[in-house]
Structures are given as structure tokens and as C-alpha cells.
Image (cartoon, rainbow, N blue to C red):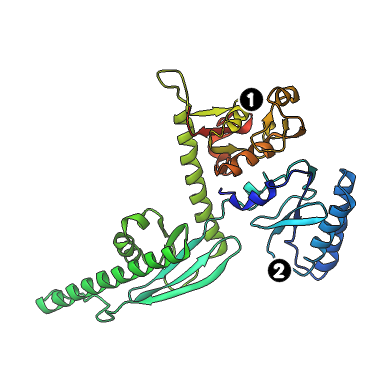
């Protein structure tokens, strides 16, 4: 997950309020329930030691969401009496996910607002296709294409020469329309930035379009087992999107495992464990951070200074490095801050726990390195 949008949260040192608010309920008493949520969130922050101005700012921000149509929820980050950032969620958060500390608690975003690939769905028939964009929070029409060759479209069954000639025309019509659909689909993907393409229709038409797609797009396309004239149900799209995420994360896990193998000088291009991760973060060597958000090491206490590369396993280490001011913080928050400010992506291992279990990185955190 690219987290550059979090950069403003790290421009100023100081304590932060982080609140993940569930907005998935849309019943008749929605306004009242969200009012109660606003009170509960501000109360939890107050109990954790947050200043009154920040508690009030978060309360008012949640109150302002009483009639919001968000399907899942919102993450809010505030300090010094001001909400600095709100992030729409793609999954409903668990209750009570409220944190006050020296850094914004952003790790839950990896699972609650992270891997949300946009799918460009093409509903294909022999004459053209309708396009639709789908994600966890998006469903909208994205245009259509009609093939320039509309006749003939059906095969003949007889076997004399004229009808075989007719069948050849049908084949040529299909191939011509498939090429036009593929070109329009590739153009729409480039324009929308869709992460994957879902081809929906009869097997033959989908296969023809798939084969005509440009090479750089073909690898993003999958064919849905669905008939002509219907729309994919949300669950079907979600299964395809989830499979896409799992495959991408598994590829990163394979890269990480390969990089763990030491070279001839016994140096590896990947590490695990808080001490090694801290050292790499101080030296700006993190190329990609892998985290299982609920893993033991994420809760581990480390020490941080004002700058993102000022972090250590013990307070005395920071003092030895010349840092006069230091605060205790969660290991995951400190390492994510270091990754964000050095443009290193952060990957959640949650989507592949079924395949990998807890074996990817000791303690639940690891990293690929920019250099050994």
C-alpha cells in the first residue's frame, strides 16, 4: 500500500488522536447511534490523556458524520484541537479502535482502507461491450463500445460452400469486434487506472477479447464465469478482487523469502525482527515493509525522536545517538512513519494468512532492503 497521503501527519511532532469510526449502520436511528459514537470516541481519548481541545475536535468531526453515506467508516487523525486528516474506510472497523499517542496509529489502515483494487468490468457480447468500474466503495458506469461490424453475427449449420463462406464472415466479424472491444477496454483502463479487468460474457467472446488485449494489460485480465446480459453480483466481484490482492501479496512474500537467502558474503536483502528493522529504518534502507497488523512485535515499545529516522529499541540508544528528546511509541507506528517519509510501500500480510500462517516474518514484521 502506498502511504504517501499520510506524509502530512509526520510534518509536526506531538501527540496524536487516532479514531476509527464505524459508519456501516444506516437504520432509522442512524443519527442517534452516531451521536453516541461521537461521545464514546471523545470519552476514550479523554481517558487516554488527550487534551480537551483535541477531544472536542474529534467529537465535532464525528458528529458532522451523523448523516454521512459512507458504506463502512472513516479514520480520523487529530492533534492540537484540529482534525488533520480523514480517510474513508473500505471495511467496517472493530469497535473501540481509538488511540492517543506520540504518533498517529495508522497500521489499521492497511486492512481497513488498504488493498482496494478497482476493477474494470466489461460485459461483452458479439456486438460490443458495456464497461463498469467496481471497488469496495465504487460502482459506476464507465462507457461502452459498439463494434463497427454488426452483420453477420450468427453461424450457419449447413455445409455447402456458400454457408461455409458465411461462417467465415461470422468469424471475421467476431474477431474484428473483439479487437475493437479490446482496444476500447485498454484505453478505458489507462484512463481510469483500474487495477484489474474482469471479462464477463460467453466464453468464446471473452477469450477472443482477452487474446486481443495489449500485452501490458492482458496480465491484469480475468474471465468471469458468468453469462451474457447480467451484472456481476457484489460478492462475485469481491471474490475476484480478493483473489487479485492475495496473488499480489503472495508475490511480495515470495520476493521477501528469496531475499532472505544470504549471498556469498552472508548478507541478505531482507530482514525481520524489531532490532534489525530499526537499524535499517535509521539508515533509510527500507525498500518495502511487511506487517501483520495484529502480530506481537507491532505492540512492542520502541523509542522515537522528533525525526522519523530517530528511533531505537531503548531510550539510551537515542541518547547515545545525540537525540535529547524521546518518547515511547508502538513499533509498528514508528516503522510505518520511517517507511512513509522514505517512500517505501507497506504491505499487510493479513490477506495471505490462510496460505502462509504466521511463518513469513518472526514477530510479524519484516522488510526488503534498498541495499544490504
Residue at screen point 45% across, 24% down: 261
Query: On the image, numbered disc 1 is attached to which residue?
Result: 275
Task: Please count the marks in the image.
Answer: 2
Q: Secondary structure at mark 2?
A: loop
Query: On the image, numbered disc 2 is attached to which residue?
Result: 69
Q: Position of residue 354 (x, y in %)?
A: 56, 39
Q: Is residue 301 among what the camera can see?
A: no
Q: Secondary structure at mark 1?
A: helix
Q: Nearer the viewer, residue 30 or 313?
A: 313
Q: Which mark is residue 368?
A: none
Q: Is residue 277 above or below residue 136?
A: above
- Disc on the earlier residue, 2 or 1: 2
Image position of 177 (left or right of 37): left
**Alpha-carbon span between mark 2 and mark 1:** 43 Å
Q: Position of residue 125 (x, y in %)?
A: 36, 73
Q: Nearer the viewer, residue 64 or 199?
A: 64
Q: Is residue 95 above or below residue 227?
A: above
Q: Nearer the viewer, residue 48 or 79?
A: 79
Residue located farthest toward the bottom when viewing the structure as drawn: 151
Q: Nearer the viewer, residue 181 or 343?
A: 343
Image position of 317 (left or right of 57): left
Badge 1: few (under 14), some or many (20 or more) residues near its Cα, within 10 Å?
A: some
Residue at screen point 51% across, 43% down: 249
Residue located farthest toward the left when viewing the structure as drawn: 161
Q: Position of residue 57 (x, y in %)?
A: 83, 58
Amino acid at each position: 500500500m502506498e502511504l504517501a497521503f499520510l506524509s502530512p501527519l509526520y510534518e509536526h511532532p506531538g501527540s496524536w488522536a487516532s479514531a476509527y469510526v464505524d459508519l456501516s449502520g444506516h437504520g432509522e436511528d442512524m443519527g442517534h447511534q452516531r451521536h453516541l459514537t461521537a461521545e464514546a470516541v471523545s470519552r476514550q481519548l479523554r481517558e487516554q490523556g488527550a487534551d480537551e481541545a483535541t477531544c472536542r475536535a474529534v467529537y465535532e468531526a464525528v458528529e458532522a458524520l451523523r448523516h454521512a453515506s459512507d458504506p463502512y467508516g472513516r479514520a480520523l487523525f487529530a492533534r492540537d484541537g484540529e482534525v488533520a486528516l480523514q480517510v474513508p474506510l473500505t471495511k467496517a472497523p472493530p469497535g473501540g479502535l481509538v488511540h492517543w499517542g506520540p504518533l498517529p496509529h495508522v497500521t489499521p489502515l492497511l486492512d481497513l482502507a488498504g488493498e482496494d483494487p478497482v476493477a474494470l468490468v466489461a460485459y461483452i457480447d458479439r456486438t460490443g461491450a458495456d464497461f463498469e468500474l467496481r471497488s469496495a466503495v465504487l460502482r459506476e458506469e464507465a462507457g461502452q463500445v459498439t463494434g463497427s461490424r454488426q452483420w453477420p453475427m450468427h453461424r450457419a449449420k449447413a455445409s455447402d460452400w456458400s454457408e461455409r463462406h458465411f461462417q467465415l464472415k461470422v468469424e471475421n466479424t467476431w474477431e474484428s469486434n473483439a479487437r475493437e472491444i479490446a482496444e476500447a477496454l485498454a484505453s478505458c483502463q489507462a484512463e481510469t487506472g483500474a487495477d484489474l479487468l474482469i471479462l464477463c460474457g460467453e466464453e468464446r467472446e471473452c477469450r477472443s477479447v482477452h487474446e486481443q488485449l495489449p500485452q501490458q494489460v492482458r496480465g491484469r485480465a480475468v474471465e468471469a464465469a458468468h453469462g451474457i446480459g447480467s451484472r456481476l453480483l457484489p460478492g462475485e466481484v469481491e471474490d475476484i478482487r480478493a483473489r487479485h490482492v492475495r496473488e499480489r501479496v503472495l508475490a511480495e512474500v515470495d520476493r521477501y523469502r528469496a531475499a532472505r537467502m544470504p549471498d556469498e558474503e552472508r548478507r541478505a536483502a531482507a530482514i525481520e525482527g524489531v532490532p534489525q528493522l530499526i537499524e535499517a529504518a535509521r539508515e533509510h534502507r527500507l525498500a518495502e515493509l511487511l506487517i501483520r497488523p495484529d502480530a506481537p512485535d507491532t505492540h512492542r515499545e520502541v523509542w522515537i525522536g522528533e525525526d522519523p529516522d530517530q528511533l531505537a529499541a531503548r531510550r539510551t540508544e537515542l541518547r547515545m545517538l545525540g537525540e535529547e528528546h524521546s518518547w515511547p511509541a508502538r513499533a509498528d507506528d514508528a516503522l510505518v512513519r520511517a517507511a512513509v517519509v522514505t517512500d517505501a510501500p507497506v504491505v499487510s500480510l493479513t490477506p495471505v494468512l490462510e496460505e502462509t500462517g504466521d511463518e513469513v516474518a518472526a514477530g510479524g514484521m519484516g522488510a526488503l532492503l534498498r541495499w544490504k
